[in-house]
Amino acid sequence: MTSQMSGKYRKSRDPKLQSSKDPTLIVAVRDKRIFSTGCSAEQAKMNDCYFDKKDWRTCRKEMEIFRECWKRQGNDQRTETKDA
């Protein structure tokens, strides 16, 4: 999954962020984006699972819960997400 998506991440449209080397600003913007999805708790659980197990295959349940939240919140349309 990561190898397929690695080239698809969009660069920030915010010029301050594009030129920023300040990790605090970068984290703040990332956190704002995560919270705006309405799925921050599900995303945190999914990341915690990966951090603990180091294998996405063992985190399928957490990934599915996140995916369901993502769709329920309408993020597919907002971000033009396509199912693989």
Image: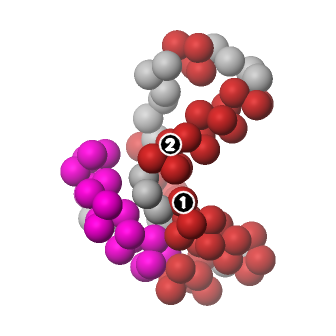
- Mark 2 surroundings: few (<14), some (14-19) or many (≥20) residues within 10 A: few
Visible in this render: residue 79? yes
Q: Nearer the viewer, residue 43 or 19?
A: 43
Residue drawn at x 43%, y 79% as measured from the top left? 64
Magenta stretch: includes residue 40: no
- Quadrant in which the C terminus is drawn: bottom left
Question: Looking at the picture, which amino acid does disc 2 mark?
Answer: Arg
Question: Looking at the picture, which amino acid does disc 1 mark?
Answer: Ser
Residue 17: x, y in percent? 59, 21
In the rendered image, which residue does mark 1 sit on?
40
* Rendered image: mark on residue 33: 2
Query: Relative to 75, is 6 on the left or the right?
Result: right
Q: Is residue 31 above or below residue 50?
A: above
Q: Is residue 29 above or below residue 61?
A: above
**How many angstroms separate mark 1 from mark 2 (CA)?**
9 Å
Q: Nearer the viewer, residue 74 or 60?
A: 74
Q: How many marks?
A: 2
Residue 15: x, y in percent? 52, 13
SS for callout 1: helix
Residue drawn at x 58%, y 19% as measured from the top left? 18
Q: Nearer the viewer, residue 1 or 33?
A: 33
SS for callout 2: helix
> Which residue, as the protein is rendered here, is positioned at the far left?
77
- Residue 74 is drawn in which quadrant? bottom left
Residue drawn at x 52%, y 49% as measured from the top left? 34
Q: Main secondary structure of the magenta part?
A: helix
